[in-house]
Image: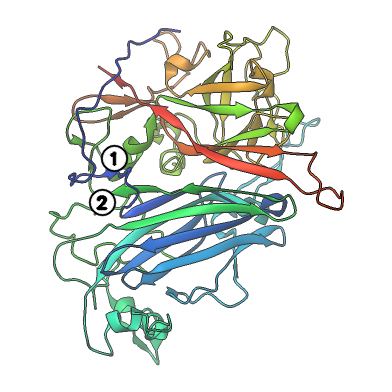
């Protein structure tokens, strides 16, 4: 494989507080939030919090996306008063999951007391038929089950800013909480999106993205949202938390269409999303100096997460029954891989969703705590496998360090069991580790991959691999857009109470991934 020359770009004192361009705000607040994981598998419940830190009332889209291909399983509009705090839980429901909340903030549709089940409407076509020409293999499959809804990630996107008003019939007063924490009139928001005896509500009658009645008339002035998630398993006695990734500068305030209702869309609409034309296409990242221009908003968002190398710890110490999982979420992947024609796959991705998976190889290296050399699997060893096991021929080369990431949210499982507790979208890498405890690196650039035919050559027109690049004004960013964290679980089996009875003593901690982004010049 021909290796390209990469240069590490060093940021020149970027301040996250002064950037008008789209950027990840490491101070934690923004106009959009990415929660890398929710799970209701194996007894897990996930608790999600969204906070409006500003003195402005806001409309916010909350979108739940399943793990395999980031298809929506639930979304709703949330109307937050100034300094509002909204929380909900995701828990198991039958084969899938549901959202429940006791929060009083206004949502459209209104969330019933018993919660609302996730749906599989958007992946009903994920089926395959048996090939009549083959008699020994049944190629049929059905990947439409509700079990897909039990794990995934979450997007929260600000849709607009609600104008201050003292009018008791205004949107602002309907949203505002009183001294008892109860909004003025949540039914008013529903009415604005509803038919009333043949007369459409004001928002329903408006064009998509122009439902501006009651919103700020002036330029877009978004931001100030933060959030976090917690995964709790009562029966296993474990819990861990993480902060949502905050994207600020999502909308260009100089855009003529970017008023205070620029992204206010109908509940259940696929908009607003990261492909929306009203988002900014300029971005700022630490790897490049100064504002950069992307070809489209979705590429600008992807550039914020573009990662060449990702690093973190793992612990598998048998004396404390330690387990480690890495959550790796690719928040823009679905927009790149779901076209009908393979020629339309958008870099930095190369493969199409085949109704079950879309795999991209990445390279993995590990070190133990004594700086041991990276482990190279011997010829004939058993490579890591998916859960469930993939069809023959799609496991990594056992003589390489290549690991296939096949889902929008993938759990990289370091031990023989999952630290988080997952049934699907997991890949085991235990056979690739140098020692029981240490640290590992996953490389997303093509230089990290052992696969010899990753790129097309002049003599091999049947391959169609594209460079893993997202282009900015000054240079390309190398890798894939990823985010996530590691979860390490421990068990202390020796604790007893004052009566000598055993005490459940499980512990879990999450640690943010460490990332490096390189440029190709």
Q: Residue at x 19, y 26 (%)?
A: 474
**What's the CA distance linking mark 1 and mark 2?**
9 Å
Which badge, 1 or 2, comes first in the chain's sequence?
Answer: 2
Within 10 Å of disc 2 (Cα), the crowding (few <14, some 14-19, many 20+) is many
Q: Is residue 27 visible?
A: yes
Find residue 86 and report its image quarter.
bottom left
Color encoding of the figure = rainbow
| Res 157 label | none
Residue matched to label 1: 300
Marks 1 and 2 in Cβ contact (< 8 Å): yes
Under circle 2, the secondary element is loop
Residue under numbered circle 2:
279
Q: 237 or 4, which is in the foreground?
A: 237
Circle 1 residues within 10 Å: few <14, some 14–19, many ≥20 = many
Horizontal relation, residue 107 to residue 99: left or right = left
Q: Residue furthest front?
A: 498
Q: Is residue 101 above or below residue 70?
A: below
Q: Nearer the viewer, residue 196 or 153?
A: 153
Q: Count how many numbered circles sit on residues in the image.
A: 2
Q: The C terminus lies in which quarter of the figure?
A: top left
């Amino acid at each position: 494989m021909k290796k390209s020359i990469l240069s590490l770009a060093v940021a020149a004192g970027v301040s996250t507080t002064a950037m008008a361009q789209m950027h990840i705000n490491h101070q934690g607040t923004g106009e959009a939030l990415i929660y890398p994981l929710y799970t209701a598998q194996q007894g897990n419940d996930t608790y999600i919090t969204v906070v409006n830190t500003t003195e402005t009332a806001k409309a916010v889209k909350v979108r739940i996306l399943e793990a395999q291909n980031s298809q929506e399983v639930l979304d709703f509009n949330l109307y937050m008063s100034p300094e509002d705090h909204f929380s909900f839980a995701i828990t198991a429901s039958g084969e899938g999951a549901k959202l429940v909340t006791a929060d009083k903030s206004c949502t459209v549709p209104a969330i019933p007391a018993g919660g609302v089940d996730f749906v599989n409407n958007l992946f009903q076509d994920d089926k395959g038929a048996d090939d009549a020409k083959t008699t020994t293999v049944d190629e049929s499959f059905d990947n439409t089950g509700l079990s897909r809804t039990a794990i995934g990630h979450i997007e929260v996107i600000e849709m607009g800013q609600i104008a201050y008003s003292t009018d008791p019939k205004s949107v602002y007063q309907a949203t505002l909480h009183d001294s008892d924490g109860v909004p003025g009139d949540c039914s008013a928001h529903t009415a604005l999106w509803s038919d009333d005896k043949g007369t459409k509500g004001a928002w329903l009658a408006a064009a998509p993205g122009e439902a501006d009645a009651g919103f700020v008339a002036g330029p877009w002035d978004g931001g100030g949202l933060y959030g976090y998630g917690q995964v709790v398993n009562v029966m296993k006695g474990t819990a861990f938390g993480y902060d949502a990734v905050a994207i600020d500068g999502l909308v260009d305030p100089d855009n003529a269409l970017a008023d205070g209702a620029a992204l206010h869309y109908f509940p259940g609409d696929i908009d607003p999303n990261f492909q929306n034309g009203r988002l900014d296409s300029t971005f700022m990242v630490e790897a490049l100096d100064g504002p950069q221009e992307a070809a489209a908003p979705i590429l600008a968002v992807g550039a914020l997460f573009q990662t060449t190398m990702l690093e973190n710890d793992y612990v598998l110490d048998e004396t404390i029954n330690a387990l480690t999982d890495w959550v790796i979420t690719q928040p823009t992947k679905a927009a790149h891989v779901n076209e009908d024609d393979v020629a339309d796959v958008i870099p930095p991705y190369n493969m199409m969703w085949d109704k079950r998976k879309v795999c991209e190889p990445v390279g993995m290296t590990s070190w133990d705590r004594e700086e041991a050399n990276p482990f190279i699997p011997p010829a004939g060893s058993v490579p890591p496998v998916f859960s469930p096991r993939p069809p023959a021929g799609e496991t990594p080369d056992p003589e390489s360090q290549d690991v296939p990431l096949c889902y929008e949210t993938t759990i990289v499982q370091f031990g023989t069991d999952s630290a988080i507790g997952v049934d699907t979208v997991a890949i085991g890498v235990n056979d690739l580790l140098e020692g029981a405890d240490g640290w590992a690196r996953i490389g997303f650039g093509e230089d990290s991959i052992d696969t010899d035919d990753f790129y097309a050559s002049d003599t091999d027109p049947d391959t169609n691999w594209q460079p893993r690049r997202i282009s900015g004004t000054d240079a390309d960013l190398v890798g894939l857009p990823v985010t996530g964290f590691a979860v390490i679980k421990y068990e202390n089996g020796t604790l007893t109470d004052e009566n000598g009875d055993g005490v459940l003593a499980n512990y879990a901690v999450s640690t943010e991934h460490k990332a490096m982004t390189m440029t190709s010049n």
